[in-house]
Amino acid sequence: MQAEATDIAVLMLSELTANACVHSRAPRGRYVRVRCLLHTGRLRVEVSDAGLAMPEPRVADCYDEDGRGLALVAALADEWGVYPRPYGIGKVVWFEVSDCVSSSRSGPRSGSDSGPGSLLRG
């Protein structure tokens, strides 16, 4: 179950990151930030951008080529939401899932991925 849940978390991360890059309309030079937090067997992923518009889920029909990302996140995440960034311009879209990490591991890994998040130029 852990591998399947991890694949689902990666899918949701890719949807939120794509949304931030495509829809945020952030000024040039702003970043999309991805932050991942592990705590007692739960993974929380936050994607923040400098866009001002809050995302709204929509219903895509069978012929639409896009418009399913937030619906996917809503269907697959244990919890998800969006809030304005507390400092600065923009918003944070987040989700939480369980079962994708061992509950015995609650801290960052050693090595190159030891930080709580990463920056992607948007």
Image (cartoon, rainbow, N blue to C red):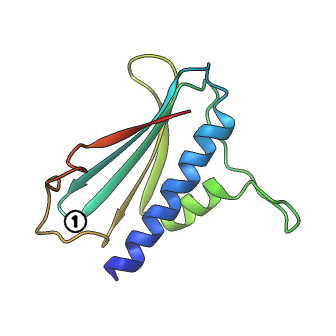
Question: Residue shown at 68%/36% (left/top)?
Answer: 23
Q: Is 86 located above or below residue 17 in the figure?
A: above
Pick whichever, 28 or 116, lies toward us.
28
Q: Residue 70 at what x, y percent from top left?
A: 61, 53
Residue reaching furthest to the right: 63
Pick whichever, 71 or 3, lies toward us.
3
Q: Quadrant of the C terminus?
A: top right
Q: Is 53 located above or below residue 117 in the figure?
A: above
Residue type at mark 1 is Gly
- Which residue, given by chain and number where applicable, does mark 1 sit on? 41
Question: Residue shown at 27%/61% (left/top)?
Answer: 42
Q: Residue 73 at what x, y percent from top left?
A: 55, 59
Residue 20 position by quadrant: top right
Q: Is residue 11 left or right of residue 42?
A: right
Pick whichever, 108 or 120, lies toward us.
120
Q: Quadrant of the N terminus?
A: bottom left
